[in-house]
Amino acid sequence: MSADKKKRDHWIGFDLGGTKMLCCVYNSKFEQLGRARKKTKGRDGMKAGLKRINSTIAEALEDAGVQADQIGGLGIGCPGPLDLEKRRLRIAPNLGWEDVPIAESIEEEFGFSVTVANDVDAGVFGEYKFGAGQDARCIFGIFPGTGVGGGCVYEGKIFRGANCTCMEIGHIPMMPQGPLDGAGNQGSLEALTSRLAIASDAAAAAYRGQAPYLLKNHGTDLSDVRSGALSGSVKNGDQAVIRIVEEACNHLAMSVVTIVHLMAPDVIVFGGGLIEAMPDFMLPRIEKAARKRILPSMADVFEIKEAKLGDDAGVMGSAALAEQAFGIK
């Protein structure tokens, strides 16, 4: 083994979000040494975005006091479908980018190897390695946000297609004549349970005078009805919003039933801002409704947990994926 190979024992995780990007540098024990965060600014265009990614990596390396030749590899979690063979981001709708050579750009700039993953897959892998799903044979993650993301780690590997990401649980059909989701699919889990869907219904309730706390403190502008606002509304007794969130919990419970009957995961992890804002309200309701529909023979094979790592799940998972791909076997 070469001396150069031995010294490349640091790992970088990068979480490319729709509005923010986060980069962290870790040592071989996955202790964080440095980090950098920037706004994504997708409207500036793909080329400017790639330069911004590279400058964020450079800042994280500087913050860590680590040189590029000490890095064993970088993992990046991307919002959108990927070409895994070419390691390109096919499309990032929220950024307006298409066919992005994301791995190639980083490798040309820094000289270390890059692996790409879907951002939710990276987050679930982070929870598997360091959070709520440690030592699980199979962990499935569900993350209600602007949409509803899903990911699965099975026997230590992300569950993916031959050349694409999968586990698009947000787009499974739930209600044939239901509302449309962001992809134009009718009655999907995303259309019924995303934070955006819940906030839209809650804002309408506030406009009708049925959610006085929400109306007084946050108004009816959808951009102001974030997860914290919904949580406050529920805690302060807005019955219309309580019913809206409870109905979303029932739909999420049916997705749990589907997952358990298909895969029997050890752990189902729920994360994202909506869950973080009111875990004690949502998770017991999801679990209670799900267990009513689970086959008795499968009732004890799984547990539902809240994600532990928060915003660091994606960046830690990405770094761990880099170690898995490029570390010493």
Image (cartoon, grey):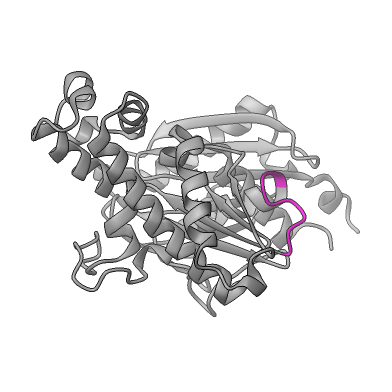
Position of residue 162 in the picture relative to residue 226 (left or right)? right
Q: Is residue 89 visible?
A: no
Q: Please report the bounds of the magenta region as a residue range.
A: 130-137
- For the residue pair 93 and 133, the one nearer the viewer reads as 133
When the figure is inspected, residue 46 is found, relative to residue 241, above or below; the finding is: below
When the figure is inspected, residue 61 is found, relative to residue 121, above or below; the finding is: above
The quarter of the picture where the C terminus appears is: bottom right
- For the residue pair 101 and 309, the one nearer the viewer reads as 309
Q: Position of residue 29 (x, y in %)?
A: 80, 40
Position of residue 153 in the picture relative to residue 220 (left or right)? right
Residue 263 in the magenta stretch? The answer is no
Task: State whether the magenta stretch is mostly helix, strand or loop.
Answer: loop
Position of residue 313 in the picture relative to residue 174 (left or right)? right
- For the residue pair 275 and 299, the one nearer the viewer reads as 299
Q: Position of residue 266 (x, y in %)?
A: 68, 62
User: At 35% from the left edge and 45% from the top edge, which residue is drawn?
Assistant: 18
Looking at this rendering, what residue extends furthest in the bottom direction? 162
**Displayed quadrant of residue 70:** top right
Q: Position of residue 179 (x, y in %)?
A: 19, 62
The quarter of the picture where the N terminus appears is: bottom right
Looking at this rendering, what residue extends furthest in the left direction? 208
- For the residue pair 32 and 240, the one nearer the viewer reads as 240
Q: Is residue 188 visible?
A: yes
When the figure is inspected, residue 17 is found, relative to residue 227, above or below; the finding is: below
Q: Position of residue 308 (x, y in %)?
A: 62, 39
